Image: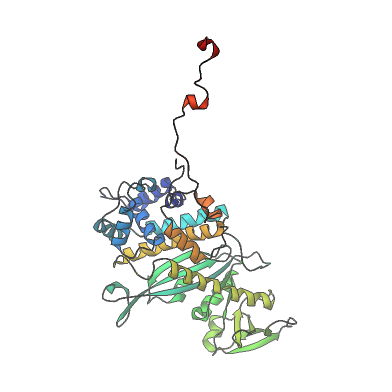
């Protein structure tokens, strides 16, 4: 007797149906809906991400092949292509956005994903901020015009380095400048945010300094500055220079009159100098250098989501459908990161995603599979009718013989 549902069904148990129904009601996602619920839509789109489905036909046919196993997913039947396409075009993408933040908060409270790879001694909240551009065909996505003959959207993320998961995400057209979204970040006092030089905005630097928010970035090559103080250098490290400076450019000085710190680091691997700019005047220079080095984790996150989930090709051409697919991808990577964290098989993240994709409808206990993924499922013998005479229970007694 099979005592567990499919792996996909066990993953869906991390989403409270009551909380999901509350979100649906708040966003009026099922207004005038007939038969096809928002939960059906979410399950179908999450299946598209985890199973690497390339089109609406792949999604619907893949679920049709699992007929008999859909009841454990909360589905009565597999959706039709036209039904799913209509739902993606008209139902609010904000529902999936709120579901992502709700799921992230649940993982945050459980603490299962929260561990820093780098051994920083400070307790400040540490974020890295960056964006990735997804190219689109302008003839299919005319609303996402980027250049004359090219379309595109941007996914802006703030990666929390306690969990290496995005705590802030915004989807815009590719025309929107990164600094505009950086200004929308709600950072607590004492937070540290790392980003590349594309986010250089001296007015924003001054605003963060006044609020007690620390930034670590690369200094622009043409920046004009005056050295106020040379700080002592650590021995036997790759720090070439550590200085307190003040920007002297006409506009820069007006926008950011604060004292800043310029640190020159030698990159031995690429044999080059890296010039770091920060408003943190107390941390050691090696700590500041390690903070910027750990910013690379957001690049690895973008690489992982593009390689293992569906955010470069889309099953719908409307803006709403595209947003739903990207938000579902962010929800899917939360689940995959959680599986990768619990797995004892020593898998890479890509291997974990591939194994999940192949065994999505396998009936096996999720935790047992993560502990022993290659162990054969035990075969439970069928019950047999016992022969009483062969077992000795049916032999006549001495009284019956006499």
Q: Position of residue 385 (x, y in %)?
A: 44, 30
Q: Position of residue 325 (x, y in %)?
A: 37, 63
Residue 69 vs 155, above or below: the answer is above
Q: How is the image coloured?
A: rainbow
Q: Quadrant of residue 296?
A: bottom right
Q: Quadrant of residue 86?
A: bottom left
**Foreground: 3 or 304?**
3
**Foreground: 143 or 67?**
67
Q: Position of residue 206 (x, y in %)?
A: 56, 76
Residue 169 vs 148, above or below: the answer is above
**Foreground: 326 or 288?**
326
Q: Residue at x 60, y 81 (%)?
A: 276
Q: Position of residue 190 (x, y in %)?
A: 61, 67
Residue 262 seen in render: yes
In-image side of 279 versus 399 (left or right): right
Q: Residue at x 51, y 55 (%)?
A: 105
């Amino acid at each position: 007797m099979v005592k567990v549902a499919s792996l996909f069904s066990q993953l869906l148990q991390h989403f409270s149906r009551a909380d999901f129904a509350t979100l649906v009601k708040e966003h009026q996602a099922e207004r005038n809906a007939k038969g096809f619920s928002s939960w059906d839509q979410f399950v179908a789109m999450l299946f598209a991400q985890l199973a690497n489905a390339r089109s609406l036909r792949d999604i619907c046919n893949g679920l049709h092949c699992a007929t008999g196993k859909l009841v454990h997913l909360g589905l009565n039947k597999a959706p039709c292509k036209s039904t799913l396409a209509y739902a993606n075009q008209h139902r609010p993408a904000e529902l999936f956005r709120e579901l992502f933040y709700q799921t992230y908060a649940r993982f945050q409270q459980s603490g299962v994903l929260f561990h820093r790879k780098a051994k920083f001694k400070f307790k400040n909240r540490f974020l890295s901020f960056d964006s990735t551009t997804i190219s689109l065909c302008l003839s299919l996505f005319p609303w996402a015009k980027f250049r004359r003959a090219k379309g595109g959207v941007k996914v802006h993320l703030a990666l929390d380095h306690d969990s290496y998961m995005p705590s802030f995400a915004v989807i815009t057209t590719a025309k929107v400048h990164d600094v505009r979204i950086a200004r929308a970040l709600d950072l607590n006092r004492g937070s540290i945010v790392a980003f590349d030089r594309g986010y250089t905005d001296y007015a924003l630097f001054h605003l963060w300094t006044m609020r007690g928010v620390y930034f670590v970035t690369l200094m622009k090559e043409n920046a004009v500055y005056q050295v106020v103080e040379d700080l002592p250098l650590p021995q036997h490290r790759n720090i070439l220079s550590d200085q307190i400076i003040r920007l002297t450019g006409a506009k820069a000085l007006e926008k950011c009159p604060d004292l800043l710190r310029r640190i020159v680091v030698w990159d031995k691997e690429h044999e080059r100098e890296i010039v770091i700019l920060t408003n943190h005047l107390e941390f050691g220079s090696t700590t500041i250098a390690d903070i910027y080095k750990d910013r690379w984790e957001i690049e690895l996150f973008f690489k992982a989501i593009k390689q293992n989930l569906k955010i470069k090709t889309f099953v719908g051409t409307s803006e709403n459908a595209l947003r739903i697919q990207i938000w579902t991808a962010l929800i899917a990577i939360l689940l995959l990161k959680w599986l990768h964290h619990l797995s004892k098989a020593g898998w890479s993240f890509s291997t974990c995603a591939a194994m999940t994709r192949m065994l999505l409808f396998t009936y096996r206990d999720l935790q047992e599979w993560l502990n022993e993924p290659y162990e054969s499922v035990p075969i439970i013998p069928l019950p047999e009718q016992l022969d009483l005479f062969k077992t000795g229970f049916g032999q006549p007694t001495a009284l019956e013989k006499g």
